[in-house]
Amino acid sequence: MNKRVAVVGVGRMGANMARRLKDTGHPVVAVNDVNTAVAAELASELGCAAPTSLAEVTASADVIITVVTNDAAMRSIFFSGPGSLLDLASGKIFINCATLSPEIHREVSAAAAATGARTLEASMASSISHARNGQLYLMVAGDRSAFEECQTLLKDLSVSMRFIEGGPGRAAEVKALVNMVMNINTAGLAEGLGLAAALGHDLTMIREVFSQTGANSRVLETDGADMVAREHDCWFSAEHAAKDSGIAQALAQGKGLHLPLNDATQAQYARMAREGLGELDKSGIAELTFPGRHAHP
């Protein structure tokens, strides 16, 4: 509980993780973001610093949590040369929480180890409200000793967690599988409801029937009503869904596998991003399947 914590990347998830840690008694000493105004506002709320220098972030904390957008952003904070998070990082623990490729987690782990730092990946399978309330589900991999040292912090962020053996990158692989299947389920639900709408069925009835049959899914519970009502406030964006399905696509290609359902789902979410719908929630894929909606062929 006395480990000083910094958070790099304070968008919707990172900011709420920082708030949760502050609420549960962890000394949050610094926040940082490429959007310096957002970081400064959160720092004022939490009563901590908002250094613009990544090296200052590392110097200020014992544990640095990163929640960045993609592999390129991860490289920019760890491999930007002098002034990166790895400056004078000996003895520090980095907990990297974004959904990224397994390879970037391995690269960061090796580079951190060379400086005397340790890393964990703590992939999150939850949404913004779960981050705020300490109800994340965490898939963790990396340095086992760091995992043991950070138990209290990780437990205060999560409702449950699983340590995945095999070293860096293994939790990221599992998270890619989770999001691949979730995105396929979301796309399938959108097509089922879209066809039901075209056939003139009452969609409340259809969702009730789905819930009692083999068509049931967690996505039906979380996204079904939003698809019908066209309420796509963003909890997990279509743009991120395209990225994450793409990570799974690359992993499959690396193993010589063809996954046509994932390929089709990734193409749908990529289309949303191209057509200006990428900031919608993943439920917004229904805009591509319901008759009379966005660019319906």
Image (spheres, rainbow, N blue to C red):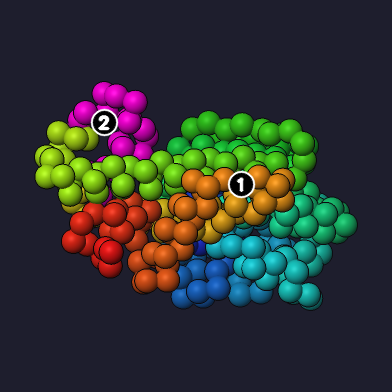
Res 293 quadrant in image: bottom left
Query: Within the magenta stretch, is there residue 215?
Result: yes
Residue 79 versus residue 20 in the image, above or below: below
Observer-nearest of 92 and 35: 35
Q: Position of residue 233 (x, y in %)?
A: 29, 57
Does the rendering let one see residue 4? Answer: no
Query: How many discs appear?
Result: 2
Tell me the kind of residue under disc 2: Phe
Q: Nearer the viewer, mark 2 or mark 1?
A: 1
Q: Which residues are magenta?
A: 208-227
Observer-nearest of 32 and 75: 75
Q: Is residue 234 left or right of residue 105?
A: left
Res 275 quadrant in image: bottom left
At horizontal 44% and vertical 44% (from top left) the residue drawn is 184
At horizontal 49% and vertical 41% (from top left) the residue drawn is 181
Q: Which numbered marker is on residue 258?
A: 1
Tell me the quarter of the image containing the N terminus. Answer: top right
Q: Secondary structure at mark 2?
A: helix
Q: Position of residue 47 (x, y in %)?
A: 49, 61
Q: Secondary structure at mark 1?
A: loop
At horizontal 50% and vertical 69% (from top left) the residue drawn is 39
Tell me the quarter of the image containing the C terminus. Answer: bottom left
Q: Is residue 237 left or right of residue 160?
A: left
Query: Within the magenta stretch, is there residue 18?
Result: no
Does the rendering let one see residue 202? Answer: yes
Q: Position of residue 106 (x, y in %)?
A: 76, 52
Q: Is residue 218 left or right of residue 3?
A: left
Residue at image mark 2: 210
Q: Residues within 10 Å of mark 1 (few under 14, many from 20)?
A: few
Lower sequence index among marks 2 and 1:
2
